[in-house]
Image (tube, grey):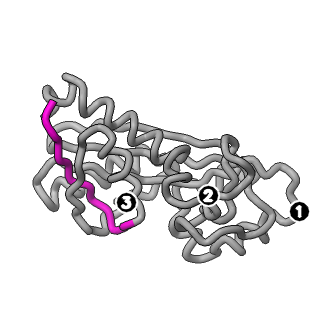
Amino acid sequence: MDKITLFFATSNVVKVEEAERILKENDIFILHLPMKLPELQSENLEEIAVFSAQKGWEDQEKPLFVEDAGLFINELKGFPGPYSSYVFKTLSNEGILKLMSQLEDRTAYFQSVIAFCNGKKIVTFKGEVNGKISREIRGKYGFGFDPIFIPEEGDGRTFGEMNISEKTAISHRTRALRKFAKWVKSPDFSKFI
């Protein structure tokens, strides 16, 4: 199959870098549409991603994909979940660590949802990575809650202590992107477009 180029609507350049690395493995290339999309207020990341993809299509009138992610902390009943971006801006990593200071169960997971819209239909792909919340901020890489999230499959470091290629090898976004790439390379994609 020939090289495929897709539009990625996001205001987050770090997400673009991560997506480029993964999709390039499958001869899929990205054209970045730098835009801040409205987010539906919902408890469900998939609903939020679908809404954003539809709004992106309405604005750009071209097939595109969006990605939304959240950190779900089990002991906090899934908080901050779909509100991760807002919570990070208001509480930051320090605030989450303070909320959890007396809690023993530090298990959590990151979830990523990709939604691709062609103007008529939307398909979604989900990726998750389990882990736990550290007791202090560790690392300078990544963004958001990366410096307090220790992935289960890693070596005890937080995402914030890993460089982009180390994080990309095991991240929730990578898992969603690989599912998306497999679909894009399948006959289902050509029927969809």
What's the amino acid at mark 1? Gln
Q: Find numbered disc 1 in the image and state the secondary structure of the residue it sits on.
A: loop
Q: What separation in Å lies between label 3 and label 2 (alpha carbons)?
A: 15 Å
Up-down relation of residue 44 to residue 40 (above or below): above
Dot 2 corresponds to which residue?
Answer: 159
Q: Nearer the viewer, mark 3 or mark 1?
A: 3
Q: Find numbered disc 2 in the image and state the secondary structure of the residue it sits on.
A: helix
Q: How many marks?
A: 3
Q: Identify the residue shown where x is 32% and y is 51%.
A: 51
Q: Identify the residue shown where x is 19% and y is 22%.
A: 187
Q: Identify the residue shown where x is 23% and y is 49%.
A: 29
Dot 1 corresponds to which residue?
Answer: 102
Q: What separation in Å lies between label 3 and label 1 (alpha carbons)?
A: 36 Å
Q: What stretch is highlighted in magenta?
A: 1-13
Which mark sits nearer the N-terminus, 3 or 1? 3
Up-down relation of residue 107 to residue 89 (above or below): above
Up-down relation of residue 145 to residue 51 (above or below): below
Dot 3 corresponds to which residue?
Answer: 17
Residue 3 painted magenta: yes
Q: What separation in Å lies between label 1 and label 2 (alpha carbons)?
A: 23 Å
Q: Find numbered disc 3 in the image and state the secondary structure of the residue it sits on.
A: helix
